[in-house]
Amino acid sequence: MASTQVITGPDDMSNFSIGIIGLGDMGKMYARRLSDNGWRVNACDREERYNGLKEDFAHNKQINILPNGHLVSRMSDYIIYNVEAASIDKVVATYGPSTKQNAIVGGQTSCKAPEIAAFEKYLPADVDIISCHSLHGPAVDPHNQPLVIIKHRASDSSFEKVKKVLSCLGSTHVYLSAAQHDRITADTQAVTHAAFLSMGKAWHANAQFPWELARYVGGIENVKINLTLRIYSQKWHVYAGLAILNPYAKEQIRQYAQSVTDLYKLMLGGHEKEFRERVIGAGKKVFGNQPFDGELLLKDEILDRFSLGKKPETPMPNNHLSLLAMVDCWSCLNIVPYDHMICSTPLFRLWLGVTEYLFRKPALLDDVCRIAIEDNTFRSDDLEFTFAARGWSDAVSFGDFEGWKDRFVSTQKFFEPRFPDATKVGNEMMKTILENMKK
Ligand SMILES: NC(=O)C1=CN([C@@H]2O[C@H](COP(=O)(O)OP(=O)(O)OC[C@H]3O[C@@H](n4cnc5c(N)ncnc54)[C@H](OP(=O)(O)O)[C@@H]3O)[C@@H](O)[C@H]2O)C=CC1
Ligand SMILES: O=C(O)C(=O)Cc1ccc(O)cc1
């Protein structure tokens, strides 16, 4: 169920205060937006950051910086944990027992199973549990973006209060259970990131800045490059947490790696008939059997606009293994990606946009299948991509945070000098494409 709302809920909230534990990128965004809308916010990060944060927020009288989560928990009516997903158990174990009587507690981590487990384990029984998750990064305007709200253990009156507080973000409320949330975000987030993480790893393995090669510039390639760099420019723990801790994500990411491997083997063996049947069959299952006469989510002129490199006269063709495998993966898992639009991140909408772009244009898809079989030029890139997809899947399956981090950070370093340009172009691209998708 989804709705964008301005909520007039309970009136008895004049003394109501919000607590925020964890003042990183998302915690700060919440603190600023809630306090700008008149809410009193008590907030903290790690104790050693107390003095620095006090200075940073000295100008904002609505935000009361405190030394630690005990103090925030003691004096706030609705406490939101905004810490790393992997730390949630430890942090709630520490501060949870200090929660004010009859308060409401929630988390804003990207994966709800460990968060809810920690709340159930450590919070006093009189405390209500209502979690949330903003489905966008800290630099994106929350307006009209999906905001999942999870009424896990709470009275209707507490639920109304939380909805009222969060309504000032202007997001579209989506009401789900914790398990529904994790199931959907495994599809929309974890597996989408696996594709981009694998592209980055493959380019790194071949020591390529893809926008410097004719093959990679223009059209769909711009979206792939800009989004890959966008992910690698962020904090590793966000992506590790939502993949490794989500109970549903392992299966999706494993299937993505399997789809990449299966298609790559068919390409290597030159099994054109089988390859086409598999790709086209998957496309029919995901995008329907009928010729498409609707409007595509993405358009050429927009796709071409955002390039980090110069568009060559004749761009080299590409077999788009990453996209073919995505649709194969959805098909194998019986996922209809459009069903998840209510709970989608900007990144997922763009990713679905480019897959749709390829699969709804039969001539383009036909050409891509031909290139996949006939053209050997990209075999080494595709081999690296296949290795990368399997490597990410193994790291997630083994629950290997350290291995995952090493894989991420080494490639992050490779792309780092290019982040300033990539962020600028990537932000513009996201904004323009997403605005156009709305029309
Ligand atoms: N970034 C994004 O795009 C989104 C992130 N999320 C989720 O939001 C949560 C926060 O993410 P984000 O803000 O990006 O991450 P950050 O790393 O920027 O922020 C987390 C903050 O919590 C602090 N912290 C850790 N332990 C404690 C503690 N015991 N007491 C107080 N503060 C503590 C961290 O300190 P330290 O760094 O020293 O550990 C850090 O400053 C994550 O669970 C993430 O999955 C949700 C939506 C979008
Ligand atoms: O759009 C994406 O998938 C992002 O990369 C930003 C992001 C990261 C973590 C979240 O929990 C929600 C959004």
Image (cartoon, helix red, strand yellow):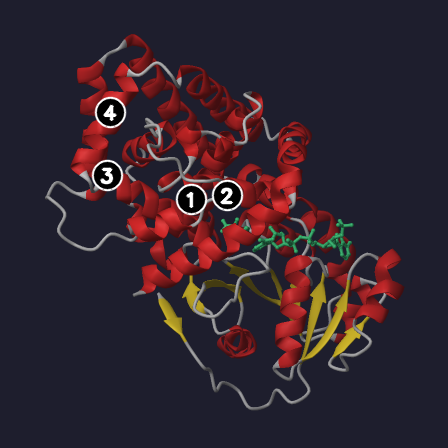
Q: Residue at x 62, y 76 (%)?
A: 34
Estimate the spatial distance between the alpha carbons at disc 3 and disc 4, rounded to whole Å. Answer: 11 Å
Can see residue 114? no
Estimate the spatial distance between the alpha carbons at disc 3 and disc 1, rounded to whole Å. Answer: 16 Å
As helix, strand or loop, the secondary structure at mark 1 comes to helix
Q: Nearer the viewer, residue 152 or 79?
A: 79
Residue that carries the numbered disc 3 in the rendered image: 359
Q: Residue at x 45, y 54 (%)?
A: 429
- Identify whether 67 is placed above or below 303: below
Residue that carries the numbered disc 4 in the rendered image: 369
Left or right position of 269 against 163: left
Estimate the spatial distance between the alpha carbons at disc 2 and disc 4, rounded to whole Å. Answer: 27 Å
> Which label was assigned to residue 223?
1
Q: In front of the other: label 1 or label 2?
A: 2
Ranked by sequence position, the earlier of labels 1 and 2 is: 1
Crowd tier of the residue under label 1, counting other residues whose Cα lies within 10 Å: few below 14, some 14–19, many 20 or above: many
